[in-house]
Image (spheres, rainbow, N blue to C red):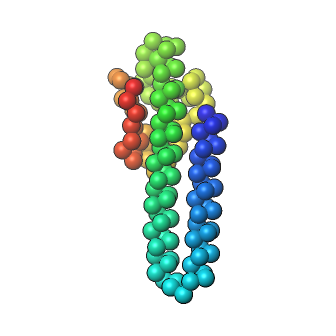
Amino acid sequence: MFKHFLQKKLIYIVIIIFILLLSGCSLNNGQTEKTENETNSLIKKTLKKADNVSCKSNLNQLKMAVEVYRAEYGNYPNSLSELEGRSIPKIPDEPAGGQYLYNSQNGLVSCSLGHSLDN
């Protein structure tokens, strides 16, 4: 789990460095407005990709936690909150600010970005 935390933080550090580099480039170029628009577009795309990576990483954590719970108790948890303190310390925040969707019949978890992992 700590590995996923580090991966998420590393992604944000890379994004910040990328933004700073692009900001410096736009100051040295005479086409400030065009460069700003391109930079904003790149930032939005990069942040969206970071959210996607973070979502998939969180889903992997949740999938593992659901399977550990199932192995221990013989069934899927009724809700993700049942995992907290048992097979995972805390349910990770959903990157897009939404809620994870969970199906207690088959243990499938998905995020508001539309990602899911089959069990």
Q: Is residue 65 above or below residue 98?
A: above
Q: Residue furthest bottom?
A: 30
Residue 80 x %, y %: 47, 30
Q: Residue at x 35, y 23 (%)?
A: 106
Residue 118 x %, y %: 37, 30
Q: Is residue 22 above or below residue 77?
A: below
How many numbered discs?
0
In front: 93, or 113?
113
User: Can you say which quadrant of the picture contains the N terminus?
Assistant: top right
Q: Is residue 26 above or below residue 3?
A: below
In front: 96, or 117?
117
Q: Residue at x 47, y 17 (%)?
A: 70
Residue 74 x %, y %: 45, 12
In front: 85, or 39?
39
Q: Is residue 101 visible?
A: no
In front: 7, or 68?
7
Residue 61 x %, y %: 52, 33
